[in-house]
Image (tube, grey):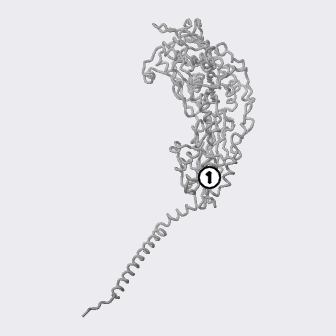
Amino acid sequence: MKQHFPLKNAQQEKRIFRNRIYFSLGIVVFFLLLLVSRYSYLQISNYDKFATDSEKNRVRLQPLPPARGYIYDRNGVLLADNYPVFSATMSRADIDDIDDTVQRLIPILHLTEEDIVQFKNRIKTSKKTERVALKLNLNETEIARFSEVKFQFPGVNIETQMTRYYPHGELFAHVIGYVGRINDKELKSIDKDLYAGTNLIGKIGVEKHYENLLHGLPGNESVEADAHGNVLRHLGRKDPVRGNDLYLSLDYGLQAVASEQLAGRRGAIVAMDPRTGEILALVSSPSFNPNLFVTGISSKDYSALRDDLDQPLYNRAVQGSYPPGSTIKPMFGLGGLHYGLVDWGTAISDPGYFTLPGDSHRFRDHKKTGHGAVNMHKAQVVSCDTYFYILSFRMGIEKMNTWMRQFGFGEKTGVDLPSESTGLYPSQEWKLRTRKSKWLKGETISVSIGQGAFTATPLQLAMATAITSNEGLHVTPHVLRESKGTKPHTVNNAPDGKIEFNGQPEDWVKMRDAMVDVVETGTGRRIRTPMYKIAGKTGTAQVKSIAQGKRYNESILTERQLDHGLFVGFAPADKPEIAIAIVWENGRHGGSAAQLARPIFDYWLLQRNKSPIRPSVAVSGGLMTAGIKPSELPSGETPIQSTTTATPQAPASHTTTAPAMPQHTDADE
């Protein structure tokens, strides 16, 4: 008999279904509990943290960059101003695809490759909500073009930011310097919190050296913003603190007069107060317009400056190393007195040359027939080379080096300007280390008259001249006279040392009298004046060497092969108020350079108090109009009236090369 089985087991299916219901319900309950647990974690345990993060999406702390401190001359003439420009800015918090936005803005804002590189370097290291400038100093056309398509660029804003303007252009370029956009190298070294929102930093000159005083302290502002970064409400503010205002020792009028003397020429002039070390004028010629660099110089303009053979970007006064020629003879002569090798009565017979014992080579004097009987005083007045050849042979290079370094040669002066050159005062150790050869006695002879390997900057010559006028008191040259602001800074205007001198105190006075006679009857006599006494020394530095037995012949030389003309001096001689060093590249001889000094002395001693030179248009700090380019603003300079006789004509050339290493000829006249 067949057994019949039911087609389905209802009880078993009910059990399976019920188990599946329980399992599914368990999964739902499990995930529900997990969700509740997560909500509890977010809403209860970490409420404060996530509430703050949420608030940050709505409320932002935006940096407020400080205004840069102003720079004035000693009389309150404004030399570096601030003025507002329009800039395109954006932040990482407002824009998802920065690269795409920048690419689309290139044709609208005429972005250069440099603009893009600097922006990307800066925004990578900025805070997420910090607005970084993509391009500074937008013109009206760029602003109008962007306004038409602004709806396509949510998060990109046009803002007003402060930048720098130099109202006197080229006049103070090498000493004031300029600011420029912060580059990638600088980003790695600066305090990013201190420079939040700031685009500019000092690049050269006073702007760079005193960056920490000029920059100021940033503030911040709490704002409520929408999803696109547009500010809806201002919630709170901490004002930034403006940088210190700097008052320099420079005098606008004296700087203008000194600059006029070098107009169309290559060279440098440094004038300083020998009592305090304050630099009164510092001119390097030719110069350049620093305003070109502030918001980014064009490739065309920069190439023109860089490739100019006259090297306008080169600060000759601080960086230029020149053979000083006979200008160092007063300092070197004092060294002979210090070591007791000569006194004021020591005389030689000058045949017009000097030869080392056992050597036939003749070291020529600039006067072929010689000067006859010559003592220390006459050697200074007529600039007798032979006298100093003999003195150097007796002294030797090591004693010469020890003595002359006390005047600052071969070392940095310590001036408060960057990139100062040390010049070079050679020694046996120096030659062995750098040229792998022994020092020769003939090289000592060349160094004694400021030739050979001996080089000095115009600033070093000015300091050495100031020390000589101070009877050995040492002063450090500086351009800062006073700093006013929240950051304390003191300036030392007192002598900071004294030359070790074993001679008699009256030796300094006798050397001063010899320098007075240089101007009254000697190689600098063309600048003498009955109004006051000038103590000075001319110098001629050879550019092209002359073979033994040959004579110097200007007619066969190019303009750039002509000798450099130099002059150092101080006045009034008995109570010095100003010391000057002048280097005129290819100026032919020291007598010509001396003539450039006379208007500078006259202005400082005779004209300054009676009719000072001031800018014809006053420029007030911070009152510039937004959007005005530096080229559209008045230069503020007045024509300068010379107060002396005509100066020699400049060579008709506009190119320069580094001075060649001279041999051993010096002719001041």
Q: Is residue 333 left or right of residue 10?
A: right
Horizontally, residue 321 falls left or right of residue 618, namely: left
Query: Observer-nearest residue: 91 or 221?
Result: 91
Give the camera-side residue of 398 and 35.
35
In the rendered image, residue 193, in percent from the top left (x then y), is placed at 54, 50
Q: Say what amino acid the circle numbered 1 marks.
A: Asp
Q: How many marks?
A: 1
Q: Residues within 10 Å of mark 1 (few under 14, many from 20)?
A: some
Residue 586 picture quarter: top right
Query: Which quadrant, please, contains the C terminus?
Result: top right
- Position above or below: 506 against 253: above
- Using the image, determine if residue 63 lies above or below residue 204: below
Q: Where is residue 444 in the image (x, y as percent from the top left)?
A: 49, 16
Above or below, comparing residue 309 to residue 592 in the picture: below
Residue lying farthest to the left in this orientation:
1
Question: 229 above or below 196?
Answer: below
Examine the image and state in which quarter residue 258 appears: top right
| Residue 481 visible in this rendered orientation of the protein | no
Residue extending furthest toward the bottom: 1
Residue occupying the far front of the picture: 1
Quadrant of the frame with the N terminus: bottom left
Place of residue 166 in the rendered image (x, y in percent of width and height, measured from the top left): 66, 38
Residue positioned 55% across, 57% down in the render: 96
Q: Position of residue 456 (x, y in %)?
A: 55, 24
Tell me the SS state at disc 1.
loop
Determine if residue 92 is in view: yes
Q: Name the residue under label 1.
A: 239
